[in-house]
Image: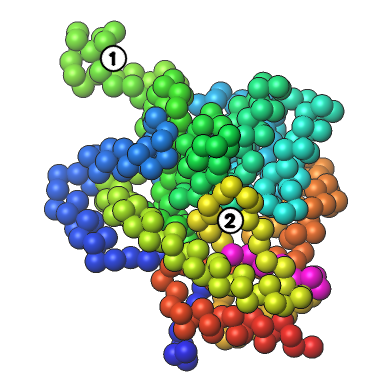
Amino acid sequence: MPKNKIISYGKQWIFEEDFSSIEEVLKSPFLTTGPKASEFEKSLCELTGAKHAIVCANGTAALHLACMALGISKGDLGLTTPNTFLSSANCIEFCGGDVDFIDIDPESLCLSPELLDEYCQANKLPKVVIPVDFAGVPANLPAIKKLSEKYGFKIIEDAAHSIGSTYQHAGIEYQCGSCAHSDMAIFSFHPVKTITTGEGGAVLTNDDELAKKVRSFCSHGMVRNLQLNGEKEGPWYYEMDEMGYNYRLTDFQCALGNAQLKRLGDFKKRRIEISNKYTEVFNKTESIITPFFPKNTSVCSHLYVIQFAEGPQKRLEVYKALSENNIFCQIHYIPVYWQPYYKNKYGYEKGKCINAENYYQRCLSIPLYPAMTNNDLEFVIEEIIKATNSQ
């Protein structure tokens, strides 16, 4: 390995075609939202099968817009997993709602439908549930959909990790983000995700009214050229019935997204190759627990997370040893309710979601991105085994 080469846990892969697509937009009349945004939205619909896609500034904005469209407000309860980034909970807080957390399934590491059912039987019913497709593994959306029909809550699939992943239900294959078993879904296009627009996100839905609300909230709450006064005032006419935000995505970012999306199949293939190699090797190491991939899924792995049977001290030792060799890993995730904001507001304490806490104490996200070379991969494996076996 080159002495100064850095291997991170995730990284974008930019091609010459990506530069060309951006240059084309920079020479066009459109820099902010324009025809490339519409093209990107259409491509996302074609990929997922969802009826509508609305691109926006980032994945956090997408979650916020989805909650706004559902009318989440003061006094409403939203539930999500503690094994996620802050945004999956914060989006409910942005709207004035209250947040609680459902523990994870210890194998899939996604929100447990069984524990969600138990919660709904014993507590105030939620207005929205936000399951997260963790590391590219689809949450059990069909089971959660059944519970939504039983208890009346809405579902936002946080698919920030899972563009390109699929799951089967009743003999039919569904893309993550299809909204076949949710009211809405969101994607993130941050540089460590499977495809990137630099920063960026999208909201997907099959509901015409929700799509209309999301698109309006994404652009200040404006509706343009209403028939009410459009003919009288002129084609420039607009109204703002509700407060929105400037969450729009630029056309040159969407051009990058379009170019990246065309290579999603290649990205997925390489991610699977790397993931399979890790699993093959680390399954032979008793002290390393490899990820679980549910049956009837095709996972486009966003992360490859190993767990150390020996616990947090071994995890810390390995993390430090790898960083000394310019291999930089990450932790996904500290349970959200451990954060001072949630602890102080709700009084949540350690021990609330024991599966998520046990997982957190052992987990380490190791490098996984399509631009990794085979030499990079072998080096990472060698150093992990060396550090794991050291006393």
For the residues marked 2 and 1, what is the alpha-carbon distance in whole angstroms?
Answer: 43 Å
Q: In this view, does 351 lie above or below 237?
A: below
Instruction: Tell me the amino acid under the disc marked 1.
Output: Leu
Residue 281 point in image, percent of width and height = 63, 77
The residue lying furthest to the bottom in this view is 3
Contact (CB < 8 A) between labels 2 and 1? no
Where residue 138 sits: x, y (%)? 58, 46
Q: Which amino acid does label 2 sit on?
A: Ala
Magenta stretch, residue numbers: 304-312
Relative to residue 337, is residue 242 drawn left or right? left
Identified at 30% across, 50% down, the residue is: 258
Left or right of 201 on screen, residue 26: left
Q: Residue at x 14, y 48 (%)?
A: 28
Check disc 1 and report its element: helix, strand or loop.
Answer: loop
Residue 333: give x, y in percent of width and height. Answer: 66, 57
Q: Quadrant of the C terminus?
A: bottom right
User: What label sits on residue 363 in the rendered view?
Assistant: none
Label 2: few (<14), some (14–19) or many (≥20) C-alpha neighbours in 10 Å? many
Q: 151 or 29: nearer the eye? A: 151
Image location of residue 13, percent across then percent down: 37, 66
Judge whether residue 29 is colored magenta.
no
The residue positioned 23% from the left and 13% from the top of the image is 230
Check the image and report above or below for 341 versus 198.
above
Question: Relative to 265, is 98 on the left or the right?
Answer: right
Picture layout, residue 207 above or below residue 181: above
Q: Which mark is residue 226?
A: 1
Task: Report which residue position mark 2 lands on.
Answer: 135
Q: Name which quarter of the figure residue 323 lies in.
A: bottom right
Quarter occupied by residue 100 = top right
Residue at the extreme front of the image, as rendered: 171
